[in-house]
Image (cartoon, rainbow, N blue to C red):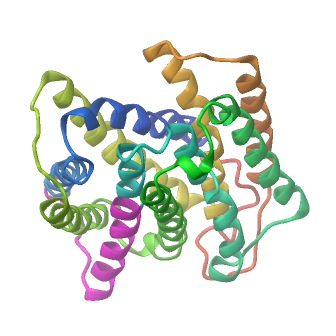
């Protein structure tokens, strides 16, 4: 049973995480990005706090764990999610936003060595390159119809870059410190810290008008339950049992899965070229996630022979 769970978890994570772009597409017409995220994280924080109480989980016992949880929360949920939502809301094409975020496995692979003791072998670097090439191939039909990069709003591009850097840093920090912090209460602290900052940003930068339609409620429910509760907790578990590089490589599979979802939900075009890119990205991820070499003796995963279980 554990083996089956370990094998299924990465696929389930990719499937759920990829719906974030779809959820944003449904929710953003009815609420500005910072306000939408603040509401989402406030509900998620309250839900996890209640779950922590019901399960009698232990809250962090020192200020350092609270500070680390707050920092990771601000990076992952304000920097990354806020950056993506703002970039899309300001008019950066979805394919361009996805392409920028797809550089995350490259940054994590570079910094995971000195920060975590994760040193990749040649095959895994080849996998990183193939995964990126596959993601670009998937996105290329959309990229060819998005005009010149000079036409992209500069602030939207900056928001996407902030999302990239924030998610990369959050992944490394969560891997380094997350294992020592109880998952449910630690994630609740993350959401609370990020939610407060997002609420402040919404108050000072947005005209907060929210249309409480059934579509908005549906999008909000999905963003909270599936993404903030399901996908994020699953990602944190994967980071506990595997490597940061192995988990981040799964991001290469998000664009093709999102494209398939857009085809099914919105009737968007699905080309053979995109399916070929999906296959290439899958091969790249498989190469990355086999047999990482860990030299940091403090790493929780130092005794793992392979990363396939993540």
Residue 287 visible in the shown view: yes
Residue 72 forms part of the magenta stretch = yes
Q: With respect to residue 129, does 139 lie above or below? A: above
Observer-nearest of 68 and 144? 144
* The quarter of the displayed image where residue 66 is located: bottom left
Q: Residue 62 in the image: x percent, y percent?
A: 26, 86
Quarter-of-image position of residue 71:
bottom left
Relative side of 306 to 46, left or right:
right
Is 74 contained in the magenta span? yes
Question: What's the residue at 68%, 81% (across, down)?
Answer: 296
On the image, the x and y values in percent for residue 13 come to 50, 40
The one nearer the camera, 49 or 41, is: 41
Indicate whether 178 appears above or below 149.
below
Residue at horizontal 75%, vertical 55%?
306
Location of residue 158 with respect to 257 vertically, above or below: below
Q: Give the magenta part as a residue range.
A: 53-79
Write the residue at 20% across / 23% down. 215
Residue 177 vertical placement versus 23 (above, below): below
Q: Which of 233 and 111 is in front in this view?
A: 111
Q: Which residue lies furthest to the right in this view?
A: 122
Which quadrant is the N terminus positioned in?
A: top right
Number of numbered discs on residues: 0
């Amino acid at each position: 049973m554990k083996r089956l769970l370990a094998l299924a978890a990465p696929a389930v994570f990719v499937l759920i995480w990829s719906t974030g772009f779809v959820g944003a597409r449904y929710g953003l017409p009815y609420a500005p990005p910072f306000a939408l995220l603040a509401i989402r994280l406030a509900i998620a924080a309250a839900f996890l706090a209640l779950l922590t109480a019901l399960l009698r989980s232990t809250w962090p016992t020192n200020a350092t764990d609270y500070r680390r949880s707050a920092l990771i929360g601000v990076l992952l949920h304000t920097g990354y999610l806020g950056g993506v939502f703002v970039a899309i809301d300001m008019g950066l094409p979805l394919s361009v936003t996805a392409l920028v975020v797809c550089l995350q496995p490259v940054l994590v692979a570079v910094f995971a060595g000195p920060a975590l003791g994760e040193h990749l072998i040649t095959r895994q670097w080849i996998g990183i390159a193939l995964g990126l090439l596959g993601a670009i191939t998937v996105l290329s039909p959309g990229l060819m119809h998005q005009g010149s990069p000079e036409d992209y709003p500069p602030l939207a591009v900056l928001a996407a870059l902030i999302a990239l850097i924030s998610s990369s840093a959050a992944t490394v920090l969560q891997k380094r410190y997350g294992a020592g912090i109880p998952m449910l209460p630690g994630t609740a602290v993350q959401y609370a810290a990020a939610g407060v900052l997002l609420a402040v940003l919404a108050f000072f930068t947005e005209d907060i008008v929210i249309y409480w339609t059934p579509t908005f409620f549906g999008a909000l429910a999905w963003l909270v339950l599936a993404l903030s509760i399901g996908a994020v907790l699953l990602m944190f578990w994967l980071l506990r049992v595997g490597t940061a590089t192995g988990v981040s490589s799964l991001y290469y599979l998000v664009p093709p899965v999102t494209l398939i979802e857009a085809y099914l939900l919105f009737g968007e075009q699905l080309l053979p070229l995109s399916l070929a890119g999906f296959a290439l990205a899958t091969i790249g991820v498989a190469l990355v996630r086999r047999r990482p070499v860990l030299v940091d003796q403090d790493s929780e995963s130092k005794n793992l022979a392979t990363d396939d279980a993540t």
